[in-house]
Amino acid sequence: MTETSGISGPGDGAGEACVRQVLVANQLGLHARPASQIAREAQAFAADISLVAQGQSVDAKSILDVLTLAAGPGSTLEIHARGADAEAAVDRISQLFAARFGEK
């Protein structure tokens, strides 16, 4: 996984920005259960959080949006977050991917 994070430019008022690349390692990809886990975790943070795959960016706080990525096993995604708790949000969502959403 690669990570880029930092503070946004002066005067933009958006807060911290963080980006991390993750791999979909579970056998079934981002089906309904992983999508709901992502959305539930994302909703716990104030930061704006999106997932990006193949040029498509979706709101990570929406189960339906996450499902539209149709990210299968082996897919690479980026987690983008902007806000005061962006780094914590990216860390937590990255952990879901690393743990393969609790699947074997």
Image (cartoon, rainbow, N blue to C red):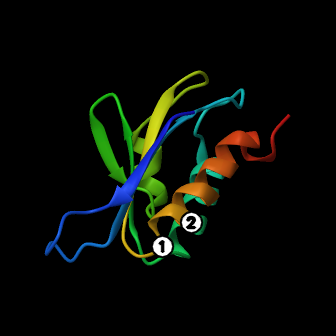
| Identity of the residue drawn at 68% across and 29% down | 25
Left or right for 27, reference 23: right
Q: Could you tell me if the residues under marks 2 and 1 are in contact, i.e. CB atoms within 8 Å?
A: yes
> Split into 4 quadrants, where in the image is the N terminus?
top right
Residue type, label 2: Ala
Q: Position of residue 3 (x, y in %)?
A: 48, 42
> Split into 4 quadrants, where in the image is the C terminus?
top right
Which sits in the foreground, 66 or 87?
A: 87
Residue 80 in view, yes or no: no
Which sits in the foreground, 16 or 103?
A: 16
| Disc 2: CA contacts within 10 A as few (<14), some (14-19) or many (>=20) | some
In this view, the residue farthest toward the left is: 11
Q: Which mark is residue 88?
A: 2
In this view, the residue farthest toward the right is: 104
Q: Position of residue 58 (x, y in %)?
A: 34, 50
Left or right for 85, reference 56: right
Q: Position of residue 88 (x, y in %)?
A: 56, 66
Position of 44 relative to 76 (above/below): below
Residue 36 in view, yes or no: yes
Q: Secondary structure at mark 2?
A: helix
| Identity of the residue drawn at 45% across and 49% down | 66
Count numbered badges in the picture: 2
Where is residue 17, by image quadrant? Answer: bottom left
Disc 1 designates what residue? Answer: 85
Q: Position of residue 98 (x, y in %)?
A: 71, 41
Cα distance in 3D space between marks 2 and 1: 5 Å
Position of 31 relative to 23 (above/below): below
In this view, the residue farthest toward the top is: 74
Left or right for 98, reference 13: right
Residue type, label 1: Asp
